[in-house]
Image (spheres, rainbow, N blue to C red):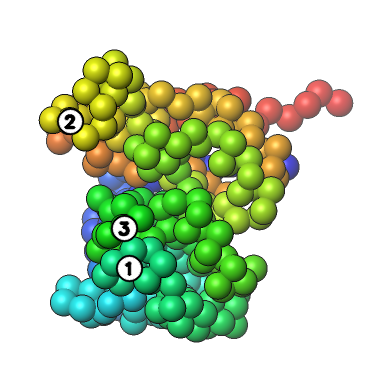
Amino acid sequence: MKQIRIGTLVSGMDAVRLLPQIIPHGFESFSLTFWQSTHQMDLSELAKEVKEIIADQDIVISSLSIFGNALTGEGDNSDTLASWERLIDHAHEFGTDLVTGFTGRMPGAIDQSMHQFTKVFGELTKRAENAGVKLAFENCDMGGTWAEGDWNIAHNPTAWEMMFHAVPAENMGLQWEPCHQMVSLIDPIPQLRRWLEKGKIFNVHGKDATIAWDIVREFGIHGPKPFVWHRTPGFGDSNWTDIISILRQGRYEGSIDIEGFHDPVYREDWEMTGQVHGLNYLKQCRGGDFITNPK
């Protein structure tokens, strides 16, 4: 059994500047992310610089991510599909075999996105397979519902069933986190067990949530008061010792990469304070560092 690494997300555009500053805190993996486009970035040069920064350290690049709408390709998303292709083609240069992001979404209900999803990601999974790469979708609703939304259909387990039936590729899975399910009042634990058994949990984002059940009971979920907040692990409702135990029982050997910049308390000047607390908390939940047995 390999150790589950604890890392964080870092903007690919700022990685060369940020990595040397945050590596000393003890992060063991980094997911490099891009918003809607990789722009004009020379990915080969970025890979070279990143590998130089992490050289001789027990650190890996866990994934490359592009978050945009690859299905419409409209407006600011005009380069999203091409960015998926670039990251797939360059993943090996970063030492990773995983590219992740949103599915994208067509106007209307999730059902109305399935044709374009099948067309776009049917081709992308083939391209990824030829490159020895896996694809995974983050389960964020981005404010969408089953009926409408602008970004992502991969936020509901029924949609996952439809997606994996439409594109039955072994190299396509989920970039899962409990937070986005809790926002929809879904219990993440049985879901995690089920999709691990299906072999579809490729990566885990370290993000939690706090649900204010008193507000739900008094005002419901459509009232004026917020009833749920995204949280950094260690500040939310999830038992990450249980989550990590379930991951290990399911033979998961990837990373848990903290998705920061969402916590309503540990934010702005307190961002890294919260993230480093989350890092140390998750390390403790996995049982600390590996200790060799006596002989």
Q: What is the x, y in percent for residue 146?
A: 35, 55
Which is nearer the N-term, disc 1 or disc 2? 1
Q: Is residue 251 above or below residue 160?
A: above
Assign a secondary structure to mark 3. Answer: loop
Query: What residue would you read off at disc 3?
Result: 147
Residue mark closest to the camera, 1 vs 2: 2
The answer to the question of whether label 2 and label 3 lie on touching residues, with beta carbons closer than 8 A, is no
Query: What residue would you read off at disc 2?
Result: 223
Badge 2: residue crowd in 10 Å (few <14, some 14–19, many ≥20): few
Residue at image location 47% in from the left, 58% down from the top: 159
Q: Amino acid at mark 3?
A: Ala
Q: Nearer the viewer, residue 93 or 112?
A: 112
Residue at image location 68% in from the left, 28% down from the top: 291
Query: What residue would you read off at disc 1?
Result: 105
Which is nearer the N-term, disc 2 or disc 3? 3
The answer to the question of whether label 1 and label 2 lie on touching residues, with beta carbons closer than 8 A, is no
